[in-house]
Image: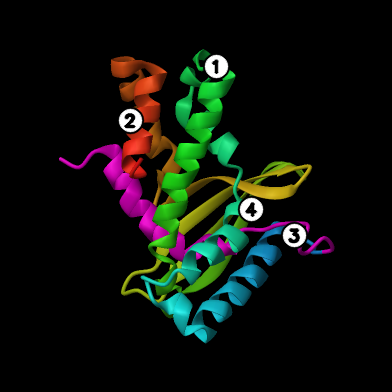
Amino acid sequence: MMSLVERAARIGALLGVLLSAVISTSVYADAPAPDELVRKLAAEMTSAVRSDPELQNPGSLKISDFVQKNIVPRFDFERITQIAMGRNWAKANSAEQKQIVTEFSKLLTRTYSNAISTLKDLDVEVKSTRVMTPNADVTVKTQMIGRPQPVSIDYSLINGPAGWKVYDVTVEGISLVAAYRDEFAGLVSQSGTSGLIDALKKKNGG
């Protein structure tokens, strides 16, 4: 049976094609609403991949640079890691927390990079926005089209000093963070925080 982490990795591969639809107020400070920002950035990033043959090649080294520049800054990896860790986050010391964020970020980033080349065949439709906390926490509901069946993808975003950043992505009702939470809890229970760090390093080839 496929583990939750393996399932999450497959979900992550699907997510990679849409991660350019994340917003940053530093880019569009005067944009009226998160859904409009998502719509505009999705169109611009899709255009970038379609116009650059190197970004359409899964083996291209340019994809890594593209992800680091356009995707990584849009995600709050520390918050993502904290949520995935749950109660175990407070049990880790500051050095361990930093290591976990670093390794988990690498894992997610690599997964996203593996799917960027398929963006040329897909489009994003923004369906609606659910406000959790006015001007602070929203969920932008989108749909990925270009496959036989459209795929619903919801982005949860938090507004902070650096602008809007994603802290969770839900694909067809499955939360990326939740998919990792049980796996992380199991690893910490079996081997402690150091065991989780070692497991992440192994997945990253370290």
- The residue drawn where x is 40% and y is 63% is 151
Q: Name the residue under label 2.
A: 183
Task: Considering the whole magenta stretch, tell me its main secondary structure.
Answer: helix
- The residue drawn where x is 54% and y is 64% is 65
In which quadrant of the rendered view does residue 189 lie? top left
**182 relative to 27 in the view: left or right:** left
Quarter of the rendering occupied by the N terminus = top left
Quarter of the rendering occupied by the C terminus = top left
Earlier in the chain: of badge 4 and badge 1, it is: 4
Q: Does the magenta stretch include residue 99?
A: no
Q: How many labels does the image show?
A: 4
Q: What element carries label 1?
A: loop
Residue type, mark 3 in image: Ala
Q: In this view, does 154 lie above or below 78?
A: below
**176 relative to 20 in the view: left or right:** left
Q: Nearer the viewer, mark 2 or mark 1?
A: 1
Q: In this view, does 152 lie above or below 189?
A: below
Q: Which mark is residue 73?
A: 4
- The residue drawn where x is 33% and y is 32% is 199
Q: Residue 33 carries which label?
A: 3
Q: Residue 93 carries which label?
A: 1
Earlier in the chain: of badge 4 and badge 2, it is: 4
The residues bearing labels 1 and 3 have C-alpha atoms spaced at a distance of 38 Å
Q: Is residue 143 visible?
A: no
Earlier in the chain: of badge 1 and badge 3, it is: 3
Q: Is mark 4 on a helix, strand or loop?
A: helix
Q: In the image shown, does 150 or 176 lie closer to the viewer?
A: 176
